Amino acid sequence: MKLYNLKDHNEQVSFAQAVKQGLGSQQGLFFPLELPEFELTDIDAMLEMDFVSRSSKILSAYIGDEIAAHQLAERVKNAFAFPAPVAKVSDDVACLELFHGPTLAFKDFGGRFMAQMLSYVSGADEQITILTATSGDTGAAVAHAFYGMENVRVVILYPQGKISPLQEKLFCTLGGNIETIAVEGDFDACQALVKQAFDDEELKKAIGLNSANSINISRLLAQICYYFEAVAQLPQEQRNQLVVSVPSGNFGDLTAGLLAKSLGLPIKRFIAATNANDTVPRFLGNGEWLPNATVATLSNAMDVSQPNNWPRVEELFRRKTWRLTDLVSGAVSDETTKATMRELAEIGYISEPHAAIAYRMLRDNLQEGEFGLFLGTAHPAKFKESVDEILGQELPLPKELAERAELPLLSHNMTADFAELRKFLLK
């Protein structure tokens, strides 16, 4: 598998290199040189397979012979050790529940697959430092995926006071090879620090720097697999008229969905649902890329004004000669999010803010005869404080959260200062 740097098409790397490197020069994202496509008969046969077998086939279409098929299947089996069920919400709408993994969020799929790939492509004596920024769920997924791995040090930056207390407990209580830093600033400030670190060649070499954000190609490819898993669970008539609504912050999930469509998965159209951080809906409306300052919302994992994966979305549309104007996108306010969560509870489905935004945009845009699927990216209990308050009921804590709720936080506090971070990383 060859990948090229979106900022320098002459920089081409193997899958193993892309996994280890994370980003290309000038902080460019890697993108597949070949865009594989399955025949319709292949797709039908694949939809009959089990999750792990089908996912191995999808991933090998991109990775090629860099990893032997049996090795890849074994790694996929280790990574995807939990289900991604489709739950009926109403007659024409269902939720793809991606929160049944160890950290109760969709990031478990990408985080665990990346950990498997990184351990496969790295030498036994190679020291790796994973540096990543999180707006909530990435941190936990990456921390748990790499926890206890030899030769891997994980450093996670997150905006202080801007993620839910239970999200924080899930990854800031592990210790060991997992180090967490609460940064004074927003997610974009954390992301900027990570990018500065990757621009520092001396630092990169000294600590074997790598990123586990959705910018890492292994995470992105893993996410393609659950779109196929969703379609496999739908009857034929719903597959033919499928509209998918994706809660969008850094736009990795949407990119993966579009890559699934590019492979031949029958998805009629996508909806990119955002909160008040609405850079993309405004861009699609007027053609001007004008990020505003990030504002804090109920759906904190989507509080991103400069989505990292957007260049990949544009590149895919360009290469497939799809029209960007066909991508429906819109922003949902906190007030509407709350009202939507109550609306869902009334029809018997308990949801959290991110999924509620995707449901709202889906409900508002679904046409007669279409079937809608929205992504449930996190367990409602990860946002227990706000969900309890909005719905006026007490959510029980799943054991994954209950086990960590009373543990002390082990985080360091830091200003958004690169010199301070650099010193910390070199210690």
Image: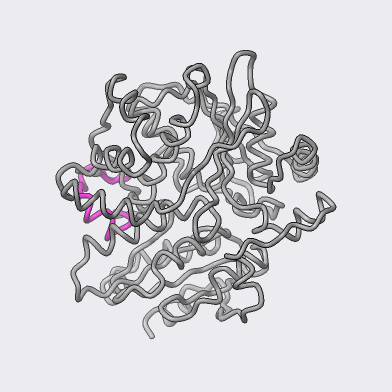
Q: The C terminus lies in which quarter of the figure?
A: bottom left
Q: Is 353 situated left or right of 400 in this image? A: right
User: Residue 325, can we see it?
Assistant: no
User: Residue 318, can we see it?
Assistant: yes
Q: Is 159 situated left or right of 324 in this image? A: right
Query: Which residue ends up furthest to the top in the rendered image?
Result: 369
Front residue (pair 321, 7) = 321
Front residue (pair 401, 256) = 401
Q: Is 295 situated left or right of 2 in this image? A: right
Q: In the rendering, at what x and y percent does residue 297 appear?
A: 70, 52
Q: Is residue 239 magenta?
A: no
The total number of labels drawn is 0
Name the residue located 64 percent from the left edge and 63 percent from the top edge.
Answer: 163
Q: In the rendering, at what x and y percent does residue 312 appear?
A: 39, 39
Q: In the rendering, at what x and y percent does residue 91 appear?
A: 66, 24
Q: The N terminus lies in which quarter of the figure?
A: top left
Indicate the colouring scheme: one colour
Answer above or below: position of 77 versus 266: below
Name the residue located 53 percent from the left edge and 70 percent from the top edge.
Answer: 171
Name the residue located 43 percent from the left edge and 30 percent from the top edge.
Answer: 232
Answer above or below: position of 303 versus 413: above
Q: Specify start and end residues of the magenta stretch as a single range.
A: 4-23
Answer above or below: position of 417 versus 103: below
Name the residue located 80 percent from the left edge and 37 percent from the top edge.
Answer: 346
Q: In the rendering, at what x and y percent does residue 324 appear?
A: 48, 25
Query: Which residue ends up furthest to the right in the rendered image?
Result: 392
